[in-house]
């Protein structure tokens, strides 16, 4: 019996139409990155597990896809080891979980070849052994930009500006939420649990998904008492303008130097955002935590306002990510656009440009062998002029050729029979409007102008 073809859960095939849409997303984001002076790099799909483990917290480590060592990986391995220890014995590599940690490894490994601050972008897939659901995949693309080698808040501003321009180009209304991990560290201090900062951030990072009551219960489960939770509760529900929120937090964090430093950074960043004329909605969200261990300063999260889905972009400041690879005190800031979720939003809102999926702009009908010989140099000249065109391969019935153009989304059709060939003419019809024009076969520029 023939095997039924399938792919792993949480992965997807992409046909020509989907690829045209994905490339529109990638090309748009890439063009914005380049406008701000970011250069493209790539890193391997797999990294040494020693590079990946311990960088994403315990929950992140559980979502790493590990790669079994080649050969008989289990030969000479103590089978009595627990599952975690056993996996480390038989797996030395893993698929990358994000692009930031591999980037930090890249910076340290190539530091003598780089000029700092170093501004790079990557558009590559990542893998997470998560439970597949709407908007959450096991294989998905990230579009990352990072600037490393400067602690200036101009880096944060560039991230905000790129978010603003990318989503304005897509026509997606978004809210960019901003917080600062120093504020969260200050909260951990003032509620008497400075050693519980990671527990606090992991719990409150889920507030949009599970609600305040469930977050409070998780905080209790993580060892915080009701007194500490009472300090956090008004912060997580704080309303008002940015200025009002900052004033309230100044009072709450009065005893925390770290917390006040975070508030200073937030205030400065919002001032830069206003001065730069950023148009998208920005909001100080003190419940925003982003549960990755390496963030140390500003953190960002972007939500679509007109489509129900998780965050479609996020990032933040990290002060010492390269330190784990032997290059300490190298501050950086980055943003990651979730291409797959952006794809879903653009699809749901029908925001893709028209005719995006058309591989060709013009189809030449096949009217016979002699007619094909006549249009071959015309099609070659149009391609040289930058027009994507094709000749139908068989001298089939015209209806079949029209149907092919319609199915492929090709907007123009040319029918050149024996009469047109004898007269040196090329007829081109706009299949959408019905407009038709006739050109001399040498009028390539005029044809190109009609086709666009």
Image (spheres, grey):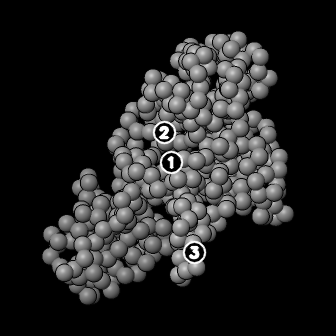
Please, what secondary structure does the residue beneath circle 3 have? loop
Residue 127: give its label. Answer: none
Residue at which label 1 appears? 338
What residue do we see at 71% from left, 43% from top? 318
Residue at which label 3 appears? 77
Query: Position of 175 compared to 308: left or right?
Result: right
The numbered mark, 1 or 2, whose residue comes first in the sequence reads: 2
**Mark 1 vs 2: CB contact within 8 A:** yes
Q: Is residue 189 above or below residue 422?
A: above
The numbered mark, 1 or 3, whose residue comes first in the sequence reads: 3
Q: Quadrant of residue 362?
A: bottom left
Q: CA distance from mark 1 to mark 2?
A: 8 Å
Quadrant, the N terminus: bottom left
Front residue of this view, candidates 230 and 176: 230
Residue at which label 2 appears? 311
Of badges 1 and 3, nearer the viewer stands 3
Query: Residue 329, position in %: x, y?
Result: 83, 46
Front residue of this view, candidates 407 and 249: 249
The answer, for residue 412, to whether it is visible in the render is no
Residues packed near mark 1 inside 10 Å, few (<14), some (14 to 19) or many (20 plus): some
Front residue of this view, candidates 382 and 339: 339
């Amino acid at each position: 019996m023939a095997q039924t073809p399938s792919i792993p859960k949480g992965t997807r095939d992409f046909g020509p139409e989907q690829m045209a849409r994905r490339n529109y997303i990638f090309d748009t984001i890439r063009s914005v990155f380049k406008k701000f002076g970011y250069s493209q790099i790539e890193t391997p799909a797999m990294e040494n597990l020693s590079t990946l483990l311990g960088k994403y917290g315990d929950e992140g480590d559980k979502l790493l896809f590990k790669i079994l060592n080649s050969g008989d990986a289990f030969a000479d391995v103590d089978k009595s080891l627990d599952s975690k220890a056993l996996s480390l014995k038989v797996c030395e590599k893993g698929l990358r979980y994000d692009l930031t940690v591999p980037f930090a490894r890249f910076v340290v490994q190539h530091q003598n070849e780089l000029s700092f601050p170093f501004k790079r972008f990557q558009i590559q897939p990542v893998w997470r052994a998560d439970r597949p659901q709407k908007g959450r995949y096991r294989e998905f693309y990230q579009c990352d930009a990072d600037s490393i080698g400067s602690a200036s808040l101009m880096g944060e501003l560039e991230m905000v500006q790129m978010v603003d321009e990318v989503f304005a180009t897509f026509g997606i209304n978004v809210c960019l939420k901003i917080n600062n991990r120093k504020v969260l560290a200050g909260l951990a201090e003032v509620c008497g649990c400075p050693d519980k900062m990671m527990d606090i951030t992991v719990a409150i990072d889920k507030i949009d998904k599970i609600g305040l009551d469930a977050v409070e219960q998780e905080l209790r489960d993580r060892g915080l008492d009701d007194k500490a939770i009472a300090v956090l509760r008004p912060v997580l529900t704080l309303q008002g303008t940015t200025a009002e929120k900052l004033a309230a937090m100044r009072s709450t964090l009065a005893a925390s130097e770290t917390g006040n430093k975070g508030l200073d950074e937030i205030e400065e960043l919002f001032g830069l955002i206003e001065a730069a004329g950023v148009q998208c909605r920005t909001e100080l969200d003190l419940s925003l935590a982003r549960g990755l261990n390496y963030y140390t300063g500003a953190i960002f999260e972007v939500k679509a306002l007109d489509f129900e889905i998780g965050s479609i972009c996020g990032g933040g400041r990290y002060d010492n990510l390269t330190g784990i690879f032997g290059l300490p005190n190298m501050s950086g800031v980055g943003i990651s656009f979730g291409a797959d979720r952006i794809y879903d939003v653009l699809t749901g809102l029908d925001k893709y440009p028209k005719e995006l999926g058309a591989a060709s702009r013009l189809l030449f009908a096949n009217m016979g062998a002699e007619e094909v010989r006549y249009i071959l140099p015309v099609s070659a000249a149009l391609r040289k002029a930058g027009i994507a065109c094709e000749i139908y391969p068989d001298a089939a019935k015209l209806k079949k050729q029209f149907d092919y153009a319609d199915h492929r989304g090709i907007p123009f059709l040319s029918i050149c029979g024996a009469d047109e060939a004898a007269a040196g003419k090329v007829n081109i019809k706009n299949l959408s409007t019905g407009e038709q024009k006739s050109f001399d076969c040498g009028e390539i520029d005029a044809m190109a102008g009609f086709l666009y």
